[in-house]
Image: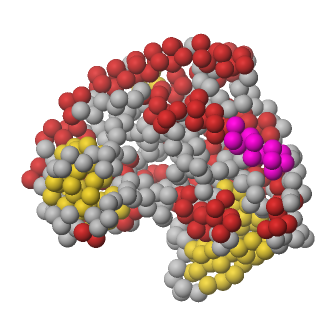
Amino acid sequence: MEKKVAIIGAGVSGLGACKQILAKGFRPTVFESRSEVGGVWSKTVEICKLQSPKEYYRFSDFPWPDSVQTDYPSQKQVLEYIQAYAKHFGLLNHIKFNTRVLSLAYEGSSEDEMKAWSLWNGTGEPFNNKGKWNIITENIETLVTEVHQFDFVIMCSGMFSDVPNYPEFPPNKGPSAFLGKVIHSKDYSAMDHETVAKLVKGERVTIVGFQKSALDIAMECSAINGAQHPCTVIYKNEYWHAYDHNVYGFSLQSIFLNRFCELFFHKPGEGLLGSLFATFFYPVVWASSKIIENDLKRKIPMAKYGMVPKHSYLDDLNTCNNGILPLDFYDRADEGSIVLKKSQKMSFCEEGLILDSGALVNADLVIFATGFRGDIKLKETFESPKFQDLMIGTTKGSVPLYRGIIHPQIPQMAVIGFLSSVGALYTAEIQSQWVAEFFDGKFKVPSIRGMIDQMAEWDDAMKNKHAGKFYTRSCYMLLHIFYNDVLYKDMGRNHHRKKGFFAELFDTYGPTDYASPN
């Protein structure tokens, strides 16, 4: 009897998973709450564009069209590319649009029985005749609910949507104490430009945050109001944002995205030789970071505004906190239409926000661009309190998964797209290949205890050797070749993708290197 597979989400992760599972003879059903594919790219801040060069944000077997000439395509261009992929590979017929997943309930072995398992899912196999997932969905338009039953569920709901992340506030000093309006970047992104202009025009706008969404929203608000009604940006930490990915004429990809560079960084499960090499050559890593930092300080007036980070550039790369700075961001600061203020904590009062210095920031509108809690979104999808607890990691925002894909104690389920890397799209694509090959019986996963031990080893290495005190979530920006190698070795595929020793060691790795499974 044909096994039924559900995929939750039709963003880049869900579409990639759908294509890979179809290639193995399954006919998956994809549940998507929106009316179109694209996930977070279906609706963004109007000026939003890709943060990585497009050759690193693409599916391995589907090139960008020749009409897209820029290295950093706009939201519209990215969405059109994703839509073209779904259409080209015949994925649209498998998607139920406007269908929100309300809950997941596992039906099969009891919790006591599952505690006694030594192998994942009881047998070590992806499917178990005794186990099923009941998925309750709701049609967004009709509000009709349905119950569906599947043999396996692939969660592709994404890290950066739906459940907003907010700072914590002292008692009685949260948004309810404020007489103005408070929204999240999620709400802002859902508005068209005309609605945004009406909301912002003539208002004293304060934005909390200093990553991609915060920078884009600040640029839009400052363009609407100018210096007459400046936009205030409150940030907690400075970051090594750059105008592009070039340093002294060299692309960062050519510097970091090769096997030779990865030799200089500690890795999970590394042997003695690898550890000694990374430790001995640390001064080279430190020097390279300083060269990049000097170039950024030369090109960007960070020092003028006290925006030079105290940590290194590589610390930002290790934690996936680097980003692309809008070209005229500091020009807006020069003209007074953007005002930067640093504060580790804040509280609301009737007039606005009080910073940790005691200064008052008067505001009419406060926009939190403080990210999302993808881990909470996953947790709240489960009906089982046990599974809810299992899905929350030890670090805020992290999800404890073997290979970044399956939880040792949650059967018949995979999670795709909850790792950050240089090219999140093709990392998710390789994860989908891993799941498809697992379905096809090409490899076995370790015992439950073996998976838990490996996860602990990886987590310890990433926290204490690789990212250090800046570790916040699973980020493989500087170890993306290593991570892909691990998955390819599991699948029994050749992880050396280049031709020749020197090409393998020094050439840049990217999505096209994984277009063929051989």
**Residue pictured at 47% horizontal, 18% vertical:** 286
Query: What sort of colour scheme is used for the picture?
Result: secondary structure
The boundaries of the magenta stretch are 446-457
The C terminus: image quadrant: top right
Image coords of residue 243 (percent x, y): 35, 34
Residue 439 lies, with reference to residue 252, above or below; the image says below
Instruction: Establish if 185 lies above or below 148.
Output: above
Would you say 168 lies left or right of 451 here? left
Instruction: Tell me: 311 left or right of 337.
Output: right
Name the residue located 61 percent from the left edge and 18 percent from the top edge: 278
Front-most of 152 and 255? 152
- Foreground residue among 252 and 363: 363
- For the residue pair 212 and 372, the one nearer the viewer reads as 372
Residue 371 vertical placement versus 199 (above, below): above
Q: Give 41 or 55, whichever is nearer the viewer.
A: 41
Can you say which quadrant of the picture contains the N terminus?
bottom right
Magenta segment's dominant SS is: helix
Q: What residue is drawn where x is 58% and y is 80%?
A: 138
Residue 296 visible to an observer of this rendering: yes
Relative to 187, is 121 on the left or the right? right
Q: Is residue 514 visible?
A: no
* 92 to the left or right of 161: right
Picture residue at 16% right of the left edge, 54% below the top: 360
Residue 170: x and y in percent read 32, 60
Magenta span includes 101: no
Eyeballing the image, is 258 above or below 284? below
Residue 23 lies, in percent from the top left, at 78, 55
Find residue 175 and report its image quarter: bottom left
State the image coordinates of residue 132 (x, y, percent, origin top left): 80, 71
Which residue is situated farthest in the left direction here? 228
